[in-house]
Amino acid sequence: MASPTQTLEFQAETRQLLQLVIHSIYSNKDIFLRELISNASDALDKLRLESLTDSGLDADTADLHVVLDVDREARTLTVRDNGIGMTRDEVVELIGTIAKSGTASLLAKIKEAKDAEAAQSLIGQFGVGFYSAFMVADKVTLHTRRAGTDQGTAWESDGEGTYTVAEAEGLPVGTSVTLHLKPADGEDGLGDYLASWKIRQIVKQYSDFIRWPIRMAVEPTGAAAEAGDAAGDAAEGADATAGAAPELETLNSMKALWARSRSEVTEAEYSEFYQQISHDWQPPAETIHMRAEGTFEYEALLFVPSHAPFDLFSRDTKRGVQLYVKRVFIMDDCDALMPNYLRFVKGVVDAHDLSLNVSREILQHDRQITAVRRRLVKKVLGALKDVKTNRSDDYTALWEQFGRVLKEGLLEDRDNTDALLDLVSAASTNDPEKTTTLREYVERMKDGQDTVYYLTGENRAMVENSPHMEAFTAKGYEVLILTDPVDEVWTDQVPAFDGHRFQSIAKGQVDLDGDGDEAGSDEAKAEKAQREQDFAPLVSWLQTALADHVKQVRLSSRLTTSAACLVGEAHDLTPTLEKMYRAMGQELPQVKRILELNPAHPLVTALRRAHGANADDPALADAAELVHGSALLAEGGDLPDPARFTRLLTDRLTHAL
């Protein structure tokens, strides 16, 4: 040592904060190696940049790298780089400080935090960096020499309150951090950080895509070891215990595909990377590779799978993409970057300007992250639209896999409603097999039609055979057939597509007779008025007889072959939606619906005659219940009293035979 060692004290607040970092905040102690490797990578980046801008800097940049050295006897792990290094003043400023400002207020907030998770979200705002080493080490020693200087610096601390700093001679350019490791303790989360497999595991998880090679000396195996032993035996005068020299193994792949331009990456490389992060052994259906520059720089590599995962609709499904900061892994399933309805999207986002210790809570409220999320969503929706436009067969397959979850976005993401509606694909009465887009539906609409008609139900057969379809089929109006549970909700929440409002044919009044000439229209109006007058006594009586079940009885303009059907008001819950809510344990008040009668049906006309002949006939009340029950069954509803309905039907059939 060229000068006496100087002992310095941490400030009181910094010392308390350091103790919290070491003993209380982080449950996953493996991150210490991520932090130290990230620091080393930054130093390598700085040396490379400075060597390009400072021609007078005498620095060797031919083989920039990070080396991990393990000494089992001394129980030390050293992280060494040949990067920019530090001067003595930089060591004191950078290594001797945890947070340059706000330490006191931060400490107060951490003390107020109710649990470790809350405290971690606070500390994440400042970062732990170098000091995370004290989570696993009793003592940390640092040696460094800055490029372009001759004087090195040694720093050492046990993390208890003081640190020493002194000049050091004969050091190479770069920095080495030696950790005197605590014993492995599974209960305290301390791994065996001297074990090669453990070091490989941590590097693979957190630092695999660092651009510089991360090397570790390993004992040779197999033929290499045997050859080394033979050479040692043959060398005259050699130490009898000498074997093959340890080999330097590169632990990280350095293949950060997202950091390369798209023209430099092959489809095979994309597919291999997708399989690695998704554990899906089929190639992705679509790849989205993007880069953003400006005030907040990031790269993203996203994938749309070709098929839905088995747990897509599981309550415990993890969603979100992987988050990296300058190629350092931060977290899986970063849900702040991807909305719930795009939970099937896999990939990586690498942000350049975030703290390594950013927490999920902070991400949720970060304006820059919110802006990144908006752009990612638009990119994904735009990519899906391109598939729909240019590869219709592929899009049909994608919609079958992810259509249900994409439609959730119509409830969650009002900013992208138009883009999502443009992606909607649905079955319709236009084609028994092929689906249609809303745009195609609008292009086929009849002259004068300004409404997109639809009907929801459990399956296509039930919808197609619904009494509500009869007039629309007879008059050639196309109806969308919506059979996903989410269809029951979004159709009520989204008012229109491209200026054309959505209308359920099972709700409200339906008038498909408005296209005739004036004379025909007047004649039709007169006939309708006469029918209503003729059936008024029956309608009034039925409304009283069925008052416990329906809110209104009226004549129908939507029926052609069925005797009756049930319809709702424009804003009523559908029967299917009622079932869904009750299945979730939500109690709902009874929703009475409207019973519509087909005045041209023989059963209705016979009922009118019977009522006119003897309005007090007890059999009429039974007939009224049967008409209502039949309408309920026709739409897939549940009878309030199936046994009574069966008994009434049996009695009526017995009297009829």
Image (cartoon, grey):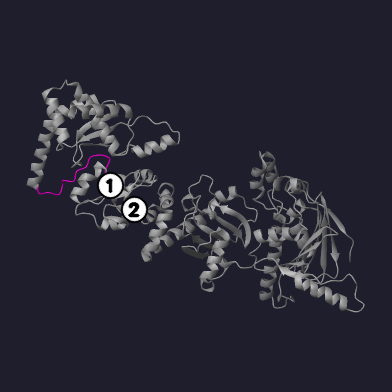
Q: Is residue 568 visible?
A: no
Q: Position of residue 556 (x, y in %)?
A: 19, 38
Residue pictured at 42% horizontal, 60% vertical:
384
441 to the left or right of 110:
left
Q: Amino acid at mark 2?
A: Ala
* Predominant secondary structure, magenta span: loop
Query: Pointers 1 and 2 in contact (CB under 8 A)?
Result: no
Q: Is residue 407 visible?
A: yes
Give the mark toward the camera: 1 or 2: 1
Residue pictured at 34% horizontal, 46% vertical:
459
Q: Nearer the viewer, residue 370 or 193?
A: 193
Q: Total number of numbered labels? A: 2
Q: Position of residue 232 (x, y in %)?
A: 86, 75
**How many neighbours does mark 1 have within 10 angstroms: few (below 14), some (14-19), or many (20 or more)?**
some
SS label for mark 2: strand
Q: Nearer the viewer, residue 161 or 345?
A: 345
Residue pictured at 42% horizontal, 31% vertical:
587
Q: Quadrant of residue 298?
A: bottom right
Of the 4 image quadrants, the one containing the C terminus is top left
Q: Amino acid at mark 1?
A: Glu
Which residue bears the numbered disc 1?
Answer: 464
Q: Quadrant of residue 105?
A: top right
Which residue bears the numbered disc 2?
Answer: 426
Q: Nearer the viewer, residue 282 or 330?
A: 282
**How many neighbours does mark 2 have within 10 angstroms: few (below 14), some (14-19), or many (20 or more)?**
many
Q: Position of residue 37 (x, y in %)?
A: 70, 62
SS label for mark 1: helix
**Does label 1 or label 2 sit earlier along the sequence?**
2
Q: Which residues are magenta?
A: 504-517
1 to the left or right of 99:
right
431 to the left or right of 339:
left
Of the 4 image quadrants, the one containing the N terminus is bottom right
